Every structure is written in structure tokens, then in C-alpha cells.
Amino acid sequence: MADDREGGALTHFDAHGQARMVDVTEKTVTSRVATAEGRITMAPKTAETIRAGTIRKGDVLGVARLAAIQAAKRTDALIPLCHQVPISGLDVAWDFIDTTCLRCVVSVRTRYVTGVEMEALTAVSIALLTVYDMCKAMDRGMIIDAIRLTHKEGGRSGIWDRT
């Protein structure tokens, strides 16, 4: 099987160019971790309201944390070629980078035959979309961006960190 990490053919396509689910039957179970982050930029008043916890819909960051957890657990239902991965643990952290920019960082852990990068990326995306949904009545101009993998470890490829 070709290995896309070494510049070969992409593993999600067969010899005829058709999409396929990668066969992980023979892969070794290892501990795996993936961390992703993203951010949402908003008006200063929106950020102040989130910090104060006074959005009418409730605890924005608490609800978005639950959305991240739910999204990670259901990634295989959203991304067609993802495997169903048993998640061992998941952490969601929030911090305001400045007065208008909120960052979400999600770390996902498993002990399985394939990684959890897509679960971490999906969790961050849905968490940020949930913030948008809960705050859109006061700020439709929010911008979600910079969603990216920042760390992964486990499996054949070992440790990778964004530099």
C-alpha cells in the first residue's frame, strides 16, 4: 500500500482513483494523541459578554465544550472515510488571545490503530461554530479561522509538531 507521508499515492484512493476507506486491519494498537486549535474573532462587546457569562442563551463556552466532545465522538458520521475511533479522553481549553479573539484548543486521546487528528479538528470546528450560533444575535460579523492541527503522536509516524 502506498504511504502518503512519504510522497506516494494518497491512501484514500485505490489504484483506479476511486475513494476508499483505508484498511487498518493489520495496524498496531498504540496510544495516540492529536491537538488542534482554531479561533473566532468578534466585536469587543461580544467578547465582554462571553467573559461576563451574560449571553441570553446561557454558558457559551460550556455549551461549546459539550459540542466539541459530541463532535469528536461523531466524526465518522461527518467525514465519509473516517474510521469509528474509540475516544479515551478529550480536553477543551479556551483563552482570549486579545480583546476580540477567542482561541479553542482541543486534545483528543485514544488507544487504537488509527489517529485522532480528524476528531480534534472536527471538535474545534464545531466548538467555534457553537460559539457563533450562541452569539450571532449580537454579532453576525464574527470570523472563524486558523483551524489547524498543532500536534500528533503515536503510530508509525511518531510525533509531529507544527513549528
Image (tube, helix red, strand yellow):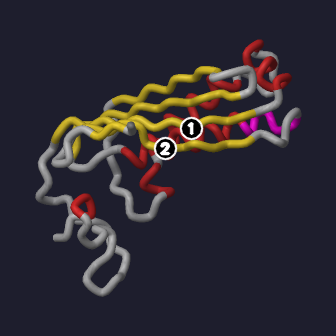
Residue 48 image point, x, y percent: 79, 18
The stretch drawn in magenta includes residue 115 = no
Q: Which residues are magenta?
A: 132-137
Q: In x, y percent, where is residue 22?
A: 27, 65
Q: Which residue is identified by label 1?
A: 38
- Identified at 59% across, 20% down, the residue is 95
Position above or below: 105 against 155: above
163 on left or right of 63: left
Q: CA distance from mark 2 to mark 1?
A: 6 Å
Residue 148: give x, y in percent of width and height.
49, 44
Work out whether 11 lies above or below 145. Answer: below
| Crowdedness near tag 2: few (<14), some (14–19) or many (≥20) residues, C-alpha within 10 Å | some
Q: Looking at the image, which is closer to me, 26 or 101?
A: 101
The kind of secondary structure element at disc 1 is strand
Q: Are marks 2 and 1 in contact (CB under 8 Å)?
A: yes
Which element type, helix, strand or loop, lies under badge 2?
A: strand
Which quadrant holds residue 15? bottom left
Amino acid at circle 1: Gly
Q: Which residue is mark 2?
A: 148
Residue under the point 33% across and 69% down: 12
Tag 2: amino acid: Arg
x%, y% of residue 17?
34, 83
